Structures are given as C-alpha cells and as structure tokens.
Image: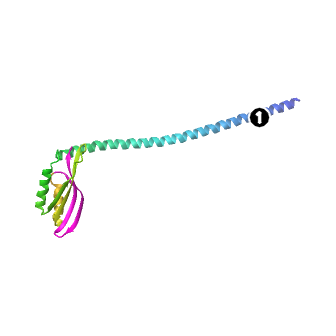
Amino acid sequence: MTFSDLKSNKTMQSLVLIGVIMLALVAWSVLNVTSILSNRTTLAQEQVLLADAQKQELALRELKNNESENREQIKEYQVLLPQNFNQDALLARLGAAAADYDVRISAVTFSDAVAAEEVSTVPFQLSLSGEYESIMRFLESVALDGELVIIRDFALAAAASGIEATAECSAYFAS
C-alpha cells in the first residue's frame, strides 16, 4: 500500500463519514420538522377546543343571568297571582261573565292541580254555547279579568241555537 492509497482510503473514509453525518443531520431535521408540524396541529386543535370552551362558558353565563332575571319576573308575577286556587270564586267569575255576555255554560270540568316550585296550575275545560261574538267576548273577559287564566285550546262547532264551543284553560296560582 502506498501513501497515495492510504490518502485515498482516508479521503474515502472521510467522505463516507461526512455522508453518514449529513444523513444523520437530514434525518434529525426531518424528525424535528415532523415534530414541529405535529405540535402545530396539536396547538391548532387545542386552540379550537379552547375557543369552544370559551363559547360554552359565555353561554352558561348568559343562562345564569337569564335564570336570575326569570326568577325576578316570577317573583313579580307571584305577587299578582292568588296564593291558592279558589274553585268557587272562579266558578262565580265564569258565571258572572257568562251572564254579562249572554253565553251559556253547559259544563266546567276541572282536572287535578299541577304543582310546580313557584307557579302551579289547575287545568279545566269549559263547554259553552251562544253567539260567536258573545263567546269570543266572554273568553276575552275570562282571560283578562281577575285571576290569571290562560286559554290553551279552543274549538267551535255550529249548533241549532248558535255556536257550541269548548275551551281548554288553565288557572294559575302561586305555589
């Protein structure tokens, strides 16, 4: 072996070593880039999750605000509502309104009270007959006068002596 052969061999070894080092650096760079891209993807996903969480937190705050406002409104309405349901008083009120508007009440059917935390209801059904305009004025009077009564459903039918009607109603009172 000659000096130039050794030199060539050392050069070759150096080139191979440099190549291996370069290959290792490229592999390391690719791994770092992959890691950085993966971290960016994870960061973007976490930002989306954070934004969703912030929206949900805002919605919860609004619900809490609305809940307190609703409770305040319920308290205001409770002052207007009777403290208990008085069936006799409601029947008297219905009878007086029927007389005022020339409406005949053929039946009043009460259902069991539906108790709730702050406002309770007593559903009832009215069977009526009379002229259309009289029935409408009667129902308007019942809904607007005195105790809170809501007319939930209403049906009319032609009859030999005018109109027959049924009204599904609810009377409200404070619990």
Query: Which element is circle 1 on?
Result: helix
The percent coordinates of residue 44 (x first, y second) are: 51, 42
Q: Residue at x 32, y 41 (%)?
A: 64
Q: Is residue 107 above or below residue 2?
A: below
- 166 is within the stretch colored magenta: yes
Q: Residue at x 17, y 58 (%)?
A: 107
| The quadrant where residue 106 appears | bottom left
In the image: residue 50, left or right of residue 19: left
In the image: residue 162, left or right of residue 62: left
| Camera-side residue of 10 and 103 | 103
- 8 is within the stretch colored magenta: no
| Camera-side residue of 82 and 166 | 166
Q: Quadrant of the C terminus?
A: top left
Taking the view exactly as shown, the residue that stands out farthest to the bottom is 160
The percent coordinates of residue 84 (x first, y second) are: 17, 45
Q: Which residue is mark 1?
A: 16
Mark 1, other Cα within 10 Å: few <14 / some 14–19 / many ≥20: few
| Camera-side residue of 145 and 125 | 125
| The quadrant where residue 37 appears | top right
Residues shaded magenta: 147-175
Q: Residue at x 27, y 45 (%)?
A: 70
Q: Residue at x 16, y 51 (%)?
A: 147
The percent coordinates of residue 134 (x first, y second) are: 15, 64
Q: Quadrant of the N terminus?
A: top right
Instruction: Give the dominant element type of the magenta stretch: helix, strand or loop.
Output: strand
The percent coordinates of residue 131 (x first, y second) are: 16, 67
Going by the numbered disc 1, the residue's amino acid type is Val
The way the protein has been coloured in the rendering is rainbow
Total numbered labels: 1
Q: Is residue 96 above or below residue 80?
A: below
